[in-house]
Image: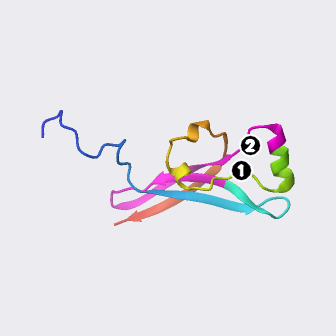
Amino acid sequence: LSPRTSTPFTRASFAGPQIVVSVYGPDFFGNDVVRGYGAVHVPFIPGRHTRTIAMFVPESTSRLQQFTSWFTGRRPEFTDPKVVAQGEGREVTRVRSQGFVTISFNVM
């Protein structure tokens, strides 16, 4: 292969498998609500790998929606985990950072 020849799998076309994490927990009223979403690519290299996932949670866009969701206990959440794994369309979604999750991989 010459240096100008590209491989069939580029970073843009094949990013590899991902693990999507959804964390839920009780709110003040005892309802299970989303505490955060995050995603990380699974490493291919054999060995022990530790990754830190930045978690985020969707937010309502207006004060009225925020009050209504707090009052009813129904906060915004994603229905499809692909939204978390893919970056397409997520730039128009309002989210707030919500901590970190550390995950360890043992790859053989």
Residue 73 appears left or right of 91: right
At x 72%, y 62%, the residue is 25
Residue projecting furthest to the left: 1
Residue under numbered circle 2: 60
Rendering quarter of residue 46: bottom left
Pinpoint residue 88: horizontal percent, then vertical percent: 50, 41
At x 18%, y 37%, the residue is 5
**Local SS, label 2:** loop
Pinpoint residue 76: horizontal percent, then vertical percent: 71, 50
Residue 23 appears left or right of 49: right
Tell me: residue 13, above or below residue 80.
above
Main secondary structure found in the magenta portion: strand
At x 81%, y 56%, the residue is 73
> Crowding at label 2, few (<14), some or many (≥20) Cα neighbours within 10 Å?
some
Mark 2 and mark 1 in contact? Answer it, CB < 8 Å. Answer: yes
Instruction: Based on the picture, tell me whether residue 73 belongs to the magenta stretch.
Output: no
Residue 15 appears left or right of 96: left
Pinpoint residue 30: horizontal percent, then vertical percent: 82, 64
Residue type, mark 2 in image: Ser
Instruction: Indicate the quadrant containing the C terminus: top left, top right, bottom left or bottom right.
Output: bottom left
Rendering quarter of residue 62: top right
For the record, the magenta segment spans: 36-65
Instruction: Indicate the quadrant containing the N terminus: top left, top right, bottom left or bottom right.
Output: top left
What number is the disc on residue 76?
Answer: 1
First reached walking from the N terminus: tag 2 or tag 1: 2
Residue type, mark 1 in image: Pro
